[in-house]
Image: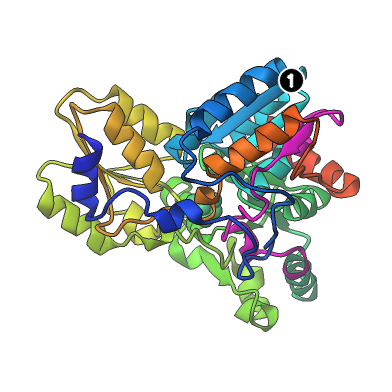
């Protein structure tokens, strides 16, 4: 399927000039709204690709560029490796010779890379305003308050925190401090089995910050019921739950979600099945429960890529994940139908903040010996967060 066909399938064109401009200058609506401390090249500069190529060549092995699957094509073409957030953090750690890690992704990913890489390596996020709305839905202060509520309810002792990779370093640090683990969308099941199993013997899990991944994994993969799950709303006293509800729950799900994956609905699945006969619906586990239970296949971005790559010619997929990745898969497989699950175009706007002008600016600054937008994690937070990450790495 060609790019045009995908555009037709999703009912919209390629990213608009407005999207291409996102991330330039101050964004007062963003928690991390910042100015780039320098002049960004113009998005219309016809030499941007050549400038990026030249700067990268000049930097040689001293720079390692990581590209998340949800990044734009104009950025991905300069990535030394691509992957999901966890794979990229590990790839960064496996390159101790690279002094500069340029992370084309979002803020929590750069933090994880900083935690897992050597101190002499600097991790750079080309636009510091590239955050993640899901990660921002759980602040350290809110999570400490939730833990206090668990203590007051007499439920803290049996509770094991499990945080999704898509969380701030502070939340990972909290998790490590309370002997919990990080998980990804690939190993969430193993993380929950570990939390409830002989290693931790948890009575319940506090799952942060994505309620959908927590619920989908607990109910679909561990066989818990929906009534075993409660949703903790950080904007209500005690999360909107009674002490008894906190004590009786097996899964305390943080009221957070991905603004991109949360858009898909059961109606999207029904509509695409009517539109593309025989289509295989494949959804990311950040989607709502009603979507994953209606889908044919559910899995992480790495899983989605593998399934589509390995399918025979003529296969048809409707994919419920970020649009940059879906478009790339469609372009890579013109002999297959790869459609976006929603009729409405929806990119991750923060992922899209990393564009070619920001990448060129970052690389050319490094060529001049100037390190811009370095992301560093407080050493105490990093130590606890590393503990939670290492627990994940040791999961069976
Ligand atoms: S796709 Fe969702 S979870 Fe991923 S960075 Fe964007 S908002 Fe965050």
**Number of marks in the rendered image:** 1
Quadrant of the image occupied by residue 3? top left
Question: Which residue is more in the foreground, 365 or 68?
Answer: 365
Residue 172 visible somewhere in the drawing:
yes
Graded by Cα atoms within 10 Å as few (under 14), some (14 to 19) or many (20 or more), the crowding at tag 1 reads some
On the image, the x and y values in percent for residue 177 come to: 83, 51
Q: Secondary structure at mark 1?
A: helix
Outermost residue to the right: 380
On the image, the x and y values in percent for residue 189 come to: 53, 42
Q: Is residue 109 left or right of residue 348?
A: right
Q: Residue at x 17, y 23 (%)?
A: 313
On the image, the x and y values in percent for residue 144 come to: 78, 67
* Residue 81 on the magenta span: no
On the image, the x and y values in percent for residue 277 come to: 9, 45
Q: Residue at x 43, y 36 (%)?
A: 73
Residue 298 visible somewhere in the drawing:
no
Question: Which quadrant is home to the N terminus?
Answer: top left
| Span colored in magenta | 114-142
Q: Is residue 84 left or right of residue 391?
A: left
* Residue 121 on the magenta span: yes
Q: Is residue 10 above or below residue 191?
A: below
Question: Which residue is more in the foreground, 321 or 375?
Answer: 375
Quadrant of the image occupied by residue 336? top left
Residue under label 1:
62
Q: Is residue 314 above or below residue 202?
A: above
Q: Residue at x 50, y 46 (%)?
A: 43
Question: Which residue is more in the foreground, 133 or 130?
Answer: 130
Render colour scheme: rainbow
Q: Is residue 274 left or right of residue 288?
A: left
Question: Which quadrant is home to the C terminus?
Answer: top right
Q: Residue at x 70, y 16 (%)?
A: 61
């Amino acid at each position: 399927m060609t790019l045009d066909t995908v555009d037709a399938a999703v009912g919209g064109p390629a990213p608009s000039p407005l999207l291409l401009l996102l991330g330039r200058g101050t964004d007062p609506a963003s928690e991390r709204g910042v100015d780039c401390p320098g002049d960004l090249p113009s998005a219309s500069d016809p030499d941007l690709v050549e400038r990026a190529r030249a700067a990268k060549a000049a930097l040689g092995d001293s720079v390692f560029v990581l590209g998340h699957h949800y990044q734009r094509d104009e950025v991905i073409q300069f990535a030394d490796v691509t992957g999901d957030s966890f794979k990229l953090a590990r790839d960064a750690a496996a390159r101790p010779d690279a002094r500069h890690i340029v992370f084309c992704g979002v803020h929590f990913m750069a933090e994880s890379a900083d935690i897992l890489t050597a101190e002499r390596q600097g991790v750079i996020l080309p636009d510091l305003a590239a955050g993640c709305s899901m990660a921002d839905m759980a602040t350290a202060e809110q999570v400490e308050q939730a833990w206090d509520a668990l203590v007051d309810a007499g439920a803290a002792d049996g509770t094991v925190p499990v945080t999704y990779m898509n969380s701030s370093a502070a939340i990972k640090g909290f998790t490590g401090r309370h002997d919990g683990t990080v998980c990804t969308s690939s190993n969430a099941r193993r993380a929950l089995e570990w939390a409830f199993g002989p290693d931790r013997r948890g009575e319940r899990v506090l799952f942060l910050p994505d309620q959908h991944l927590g619920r989908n994994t607990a109910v679909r993969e561990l066989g818990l019921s929906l009534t075993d799950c409660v949703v903790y709303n950080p904007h209500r006293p005690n999360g909107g739950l009674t002490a008894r509800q906190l004590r009786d729950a097996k899964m305390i799900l943080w009221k957070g979600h991905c603004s991109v994956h949360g858009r898909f609905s059961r109606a999207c699945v029904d509509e695409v099945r009517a539109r593309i006969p025989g289509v295989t619906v494949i959804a990311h586990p950040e989607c709502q429960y009603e979507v994953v239970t209606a889908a044919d296949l559910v899995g992480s971005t790495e899983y989605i890529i593998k399934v589509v790559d390995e399918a025979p010619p003529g296969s048809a997929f409707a994919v419920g994940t970020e649009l940059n990745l879906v478009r790339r898969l469609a372009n890579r497989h013109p002999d297959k139908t790869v459609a976006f699950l929603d009729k409405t175009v929806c990119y991750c706007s923060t992922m899209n903040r990393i564009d070619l002008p920001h990448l060129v600016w970052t690389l050319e600054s490094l060529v001049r010996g100037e390190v811009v937008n370095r992301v560093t994690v407080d050493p105490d937070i990093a130590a606890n967060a590393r503990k939670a990450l290492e627990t994940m790495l040791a999961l069976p």
